């Protein structure tokens, strides 16, 4: 398993610890098929690599967590979920020793998706992760 995949799965595990969370996962093509709300998915958004003279790498990756709500008060529900995800990551910022540092760095705008599950709200949370790995590992 690649380091990147291990970190994505570790983030998903942290999100699964949030009380009252519906669906979670790390497959980007499933978020629009959710049936249990709120739902949150872990997707690699971008990464930058810095190579050391030893040919090892430091990677700064940004993960996007699309949070999906079906609610009369999506703003309030988002605030609760945002705080809960941030707390879970703050409790283990090394993601079990995989990362140098992981933290919630912000959120995106609300969007609506009326064609999904009878109409839902979607808002992204961004998690930045810095990690190192030796040469020849993705």
Image: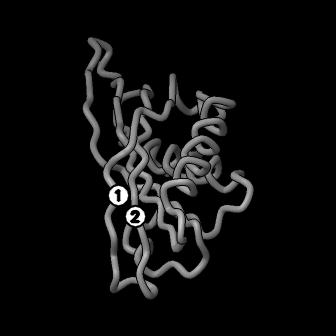
Q: Residue at x 64, y 47 (%)?
A: 14
Please rate how many residues cluster around mark 2, counting C-alpha atoms within 10 Å: few if below 14, some from 14 to 19, many from 20.
Answer: many
Q: Is 16 in front, or is 55?
A: 16
Q: Would you say 77 lies left or right of 120 here?
A: right
Mark 1 lies on a secondary structure that is loop
Q: Would you say 45 lies left or right of 105 here?
A: left
Residue 52 percent coordinates (x, y): 29, 15
Q: Residue at x 45, y 81 (%)?
A: 33
Residue 57 percent coordinates (x, y): 33, 25
- Choose the circle earlier in sequence order: 1 or 2: 1
Q: Would you say 60 lies left or right of 19 here?
A: left
The answer to whether 91 is drawn above or below residue 122 in the figure is: above
Q: Which of the 4 image quadrants contains residue 24?
A: bottom right
Please name the residue that numbered disc 1 is placed on: 110
Residue 67 percent coordinates (x, y): 47, 60
Q: Would you say 52 lies left or right of 29 here?
A: left
Please name the residue that numbered disc 2 is placed on: 122
The answer to whether 95 is drawn above or below residue 5 in the figure is: above
Residue 55 percent coordinates (x, y): 29, 21
């Amino acid at each position: 398993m690649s380091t990147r995949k291990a970190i994505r799965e570790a983030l998903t595990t942290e999100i699964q610890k949030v009380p009252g969370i519906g669906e979670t996962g790390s497959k980007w093509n499933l978020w629009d098929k959710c049936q249990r709300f709120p739902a949150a998915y872990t997707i690699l958004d971008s990464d930058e690599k810095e190579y050391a003279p030893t040919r090892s790498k430091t990677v700064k990756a940004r993960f996007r967590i699309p949070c999906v709500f079906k609610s009369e008060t999506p703003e309030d529900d988002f605030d609760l979920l945002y705080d809960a995800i941030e707390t879970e990551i703050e409790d283990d910022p090394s993601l079990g020793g995989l990362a140098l540092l992981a933290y919630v760095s912000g959120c995106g705008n609300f969007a609506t998706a009326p064609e999904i599950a009878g109409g839902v709200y979607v808002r992204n949370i961004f998690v930045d992760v810095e990690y190192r790995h030796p040469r020849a590992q993705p």
